[in-house]
Image: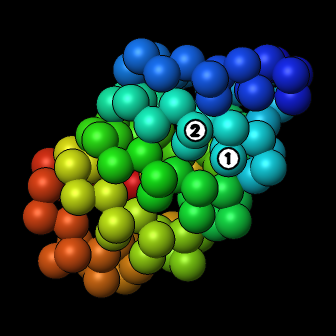
Amino acid sequence: MTGEGMIEIGKMTVLEVLDVSGCKIADPQVAYIASASNIHDLDLEGTSISDAGVEHLVAIKDLWKLNLAKTHVSDGGLKKLAQLNKLEFLDLTGTTVTRSGLQKLRPLMKSLREVHL
C-alpha cells in the first residue's frame, strides 16, 4: 500500500471494513484512514503504527472493531481509545499494552465486550 493508495482510501465515504494488516503503514498514513469516517471494522495488525497513530483513529466515531495486534501501541495510546464510545472488540496481542493500562481503560469504555491482550 502506497501513500497515494492511502489518500484514495480516505476519500471512500462508504467504506465500512478495511484490512491493511501487514502493510507498510505508519502513523502519518493513519490520518488518511481516519478520513474514511464510516469505517466500522479496522484491521491494522502488523503495521508500524504507534500511540501517535492512535490519535488519528479517534476521528472514526462509529468504529466498533479494532485490531492493533503486533503494533507499537502502548498504554499511552490506549488512553486515547477511550474516546471511541462504540468500540466493542479490541485486539492488542503482541503490543506493549499492560493489564494495568487496560484495567484503567475498562471503566471508560462501557461498550467494550471483547479484548485480546
Q: CA distance from mark 2 to mark 1?
A: 7 Å
Of the residues shown, which amino acid type is indicated by label 2?
Ser
Of the residues shown, which amino acid type is indicated by label 1?
Ala
Label 1, secondary structure: give it: helix
Residue 12 vs 54, above or below: the answer is above
- What mark, if any, has residue 35 been given in the picture? 2
Percent coordinates x, y for residue 70 in the rendering: 62, 44
Pick the residue in front: 33 or 73.
Answer: 33
- What mark, if any, has residue 117 been given in the picture? none
Q: Which residue matches tag 1? A: 31
Mark 2, other Cα within 10 Å: few <14 / some 14–19 / many ≥20: many
Name the residue rendered at 32%, 58% in the picture. 84
Percent coordinates x, y for residue 62 in the rendering: 29, 41
Name the residue rendered at 21%, 49% in the picture. 86
Percent coordinates x, y for residue 57 in the rendering: 52, 52
Mark 2 and mark 1 in contact? Answer it, CB < 8 Å.
yes
Pick the residue in front: 91 or 16.
Answer: 16
Name the residue rendered at 67%, 56% in the picture. 53
Q: Quadrant of residue 105?
A: bottom left
Name the residue rendered at 34%, 41% in the picture. 63
Question: Horizontally, is 44 left or right of 50 in the view?
Answer: left
